[in-house]
C-alpha cells in the first residue's frame, strides 16, 4: 500500500510514501490547515495526515477497523473519519496537531469525540449546518452535533426496510438517499 502524488500536467511522479496498510477503500480528503494543504487518509491500522507537498506524515492515530470505506469530511477545524464494519468507529479529530495523536477520549485533545454504534459501512457522511448525518447499510439514519458528538437522533429507521450502499447527498435542506430497492428517500435535514 502506498500514497502517490502526480503532477497534474505531466503525470510525473512527485512523491510516493509506503503506508503499511492492507486495503482501504476511502478516498483521501484535502484540507488546508494554517495555509498548508494536507491529505487525510482513513485506514484500518492508522488514520494519517500527510503534507500534500512532500508526503511527510504530519499526524497519525490508530485506525478504524477493517474495510474502511466512508470518505472523510471536514468543517470548522475538525475532520470526521468513520468505519462501520468490524470494530466500527467514528472519530472527530481536531486539525492542527502533529505527531502521534494517539490518546483516547480520556486524555487526548486531538480527538474531539468518538462513536462506535450505527456508523456507515459503505456510505460517506454528510455535513450540513453543524450536523453530521450518516446511514447504515441496513437502512438507519443518524444525526449528530458535529462539534460535541451529541446525537440529535441515532439509528432512526426509514418507513420501510431498505438496503443502502450509496452515500446520501445533501442539497439545501434535504438529504437524498438512494436505496438498493430503487427508491430515493428524501429527508428534511435538521
Image (cartoon, rainbow, N blue to C red):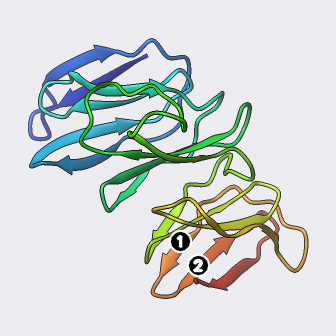
Q: Is residue 117 above or below residue 110?
A: below
Q: Name which residue lies at 9% across and 49% down.
A: 35
> Could you tell me which secondary element the residue under label 1 belongs to?
strand
Give how far across and how far down residue 76 sits, in percent.
32, 62
Relative to residue 33, is residue 76 drawn left or right? Answer: right
Is 173 situated left or right of 116 in this image?
left
**Label 1 sits on residue:** 169
Label placed on residue 151? none
Q: Are marks 1 and 2 in contact (CB under 8 Å)?
A: yes
Q: Which residue is mark 2?
A: 175
Name the foreground residue: 139 vs 60.
60
Residue 161, quarter of picture: bottom right
> In the rendering, at what x and y percent does residue 19 appear?
39, 16
Q: How many marks?
A: 2
| 66 with respect to 49 (left or right) | right
Residue at left offset 30%, top offset 45%: 95
Q: Is residue 174 above or below residue 9?
A: below
Residue 99 in the image, given as x and y percentages of width and height: 28, 23
Q: CA distance from mark 1 to mark 2?
A: 6 Å
Residue closest to the eye, 106 or 112: 106
For marks 1 and 2, the one nearer the N-term is 1
Please identify the residue farthest to the front as the structure is shown. 107
Image location (x, y in percent) of residue 146: 49, 63
Is 92 in front, or is 108? 108
Residue in the picture at 53% in, 71% down: 169
Amino acid at each position: 500500500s502506498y500514497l502517490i502524488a502526480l503532477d497534474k500536467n505531466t503525470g510525473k511522479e512527485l512523491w510516493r510514501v509506503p503506508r503499511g496498510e492492507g486495503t482501504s477503500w476511502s478516498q483521501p480528503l484535502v484540507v488546508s490547515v494554517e495555509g498548508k494543504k494536507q491529505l487525510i487518509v482513513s485506514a484500518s491500522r492508522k488514520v494519517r495526515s500527510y503534507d500534500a507537498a512532500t508526503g511527510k506524515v504530519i499526524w497519525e492515530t490508530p485506525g478504524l477497523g477493517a474495510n474502511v470505506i466512508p470518505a472523510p469530511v471536514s468543517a470548522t477545524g475538525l475532520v470526521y473519519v468513520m468505519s462501520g464494519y468490524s470494530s466500527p468507529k467514528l472519530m472527530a479529530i481536531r486539525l492542527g496537531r502533529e505527531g502521534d495523536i494517539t490518546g483516547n477520549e480520556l486524555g487526548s485533545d486531538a480527538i474531539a469525540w468518538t462513536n462506535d454504534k450505527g456508523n456507515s459501512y459503505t456510505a460517506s457522511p454528510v455535513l450540513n449546518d453543524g450536523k453530521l448525518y450518516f446511514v447504515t447499510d441496513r437502512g438507519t439514519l443518524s444525526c449528530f452535533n458535529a462539534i460535541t458528538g451529541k446525537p440529535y437522533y441515532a439509528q432512526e429507521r426509514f418507513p420501510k426496510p431498505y438496503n443502502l450502499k450509496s452515500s446520501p447527498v445533501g442539497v439545501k435542506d434535504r438529504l437524498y438517499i438512494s436505496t438498493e430497492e430503487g427508491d430515493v428517500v428524501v429527508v428534511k435535514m435538521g
